[in-house]
Image (spheres, helix red, strand yellow):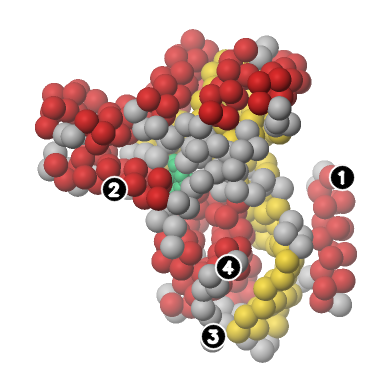
């Protein structure tokens, strides 16, 4: 364990003692993720190149025998307490809904869920497009799994957590976030095929680092934009008589583009090309083909801006800052868009200079202090030793 992890563990244990006057008996963790390519392709059953990241959510827990869950968030300095036989979603508190949603879905599936006291600590920045909610869900499902004495595959766990988010929280997300958080493999990116949920591990060539640049601008995600994009894609697929946009090649779509209303055509064009770019970027990163990485990332950002229309002014400023910084190989949006984090592939020898230049340029352009995180590929949800 690194010394920073030892310190983190001690601070979580101290909070646990303070809140619950006992020692935790179980620790679980699950990572956030950044998508290297494949914006909004997951619910279109296409490809995503995703990186489960070395920023994660930890939960320290201790079993209770009275069917009560008490949970404290160190990040929000907030508590929730509920009975497992009386779960109801809370209108005004979203983080509690992720917690209760996971418990409710596991119970509905017939899995034994035990009461517990728990403290949550996350190094995934909240609400910034790095899947802090999926990391919470997947870490929590891992706690309930260990306390309940049952076991599911990482794939099953991801699907259960997605169900909690879809059905309990009411966010109709695809599988990307939970899948990344459950299936992460240290040292590897994952090329996820959202049609059959298979993955291929992708080793990024030496000398290339993944650097996340947080615009610090509020995402307006839960609003209608995400659902609107999703339904435009579904409309396109229905008009073209395919079950999902995944079934179309860029050439097949181009030949029939005129059959679609213009806005729907733009959305479809982006998704079909973006899914192909995810596969292409996997190969380019393995081969260390920097020119291809640059070109694929540029095309992804242009499409997100002009066709899928998920970019904000803050994202454009950050894109300019990233592209002007030393060591940049490629840069693009990340997550759902509309603000939040963006991602760059950077020459490993220049990450410090890249970081300093991005912070400077972005502050100069927007007056906002950004955050920049260099990340590694991390292991998926697991019980910690
Ligand atoms: C959010 C959703 C994911 C995915 C991305 C966009 O993170 O939760 O399922 O659709 O947006 O790629």
CA–CA distance between discs 3 and 4?
18 Å
Asked whether residue 331 appears in the rendered view, the answer is yes
Residue 246 vs 213, above or below: the answer is below
Q: Which residue is mark 3?
A: 86
Q: Residue at x 87, y 45 (%)?
A: 3
Give the foreground label among 1 and 4: 4
The answer to which of marks 1 and 2 sits earlier in the sequence is 1
Residue 316 vs 124, above or below: the answer is above
Give the foreground label among 3 and 2: 2
- What numbered label is drawn on residue 92? 4
The answer to which of marks 3 and 2 sits earlier in the sequence is 3
Q: Residue at x 70, y 83 (%)?
A: 64
The picture quadrant where one finds residue 184 is top right
Q: Which residue is mark 1?
A: 3
CA–CA distance between discs 1 and 2?
47 Å
How many residues crowd mark 3 within 10 Å: few (<14), some (14–19), many (20+)? few
- What numbered label is drawn on residue 243? none
Asked whether residue 184 appears in the rendered view, the answer is no
Q: Residue at x 67, y 54 (%)?
A: 57
- Residue 318 in the image, given as x and y percentages of width and height: 60, 25
- Residue 90 in the image, given as x and y percentages of width and height: 55, 73
Give the foreground label among 3 and 4: 4
The answer to which of marks 3 and 1 sits earlier in the sequence is 1
Q: Residue at x 36, y 33 (%)?
A: 308
Image check: 124 left or right of 192? right
């Amino acid at each position: 364990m690194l010394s920073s992890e030892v310190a983190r563990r001690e601070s979580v244990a101290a909070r646990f003692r303070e809140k619950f006057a006992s020692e935790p008996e179980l620790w679980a963790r699950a990572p956030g993720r950044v998508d290297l390519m494949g914006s909004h392709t997951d619910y279109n059953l296409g490809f995503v190149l995703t990186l489960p990241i070395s920023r994660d959510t930890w939960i320290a827990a201790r079993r209770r025998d009275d069917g009560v869950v008490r949970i404290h968030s160190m990040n929000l300095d907030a508590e929730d307490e509920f009975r497992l036989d009386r779960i109801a979603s809370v209108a005004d508190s979203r983080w509690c809904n992720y917690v209760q949603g996971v418990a409710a879905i596991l119970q509905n599936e017939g899995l034994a869920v035990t009461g517990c006291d728990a403290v949550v600590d996350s190094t995934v920045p909240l609400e910034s497009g790095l899947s802090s909610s999926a990391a919470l869900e997947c870490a929590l499902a891992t706690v309930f799994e260990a306390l309940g004495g049952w076991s599911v595959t990482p794939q099953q766990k991801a699907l259960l957590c997605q169900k909690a988010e879809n059905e309990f929280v009411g966010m109709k997300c695809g599988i990307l976030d939970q899948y990344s958080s459950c299936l992460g493999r240290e040292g590897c990116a994952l090329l996820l095929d959202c049609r059959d949920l298979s993955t291929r591990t992708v080793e990024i060539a030496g000398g290339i680092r993944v650097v996340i640049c947080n615009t610090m601008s509020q995402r307006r995600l839960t609003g209608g934009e995400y659902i609107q994009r999703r339904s435009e894609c579904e409309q396109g697929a229905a008009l073209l008589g395919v079950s999902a946009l995944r079934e179309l090649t860029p050439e097949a779509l181009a030949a029939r583009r005129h059959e679609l209303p213009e806005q729907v055509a733009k959305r479809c064009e982006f998704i079909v090309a973006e899914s192909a770019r995810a596969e292409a970027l996997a190969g380019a990163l393995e081969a260390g083909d920097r020119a291809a990485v640059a070109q694929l990332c540029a095309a992804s950002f242009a499409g997100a801006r002009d066709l899928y229309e998920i970019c904000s002014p803050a994202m454009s400023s950050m894109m300019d800052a990233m592209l002007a910084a030393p060591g940049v190989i490629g840069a693009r949006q990340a997550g759902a868009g509309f603000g939040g984090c963006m991602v760059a592939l950077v020459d490993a020898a220049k990450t410090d200079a890249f970081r300093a230049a991005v912070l400077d340029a972005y502050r100069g352009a927007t007056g906002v202090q950004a955050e920049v995180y260099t990340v590694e590929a991390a292991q998926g949800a697991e019980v910690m030793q």
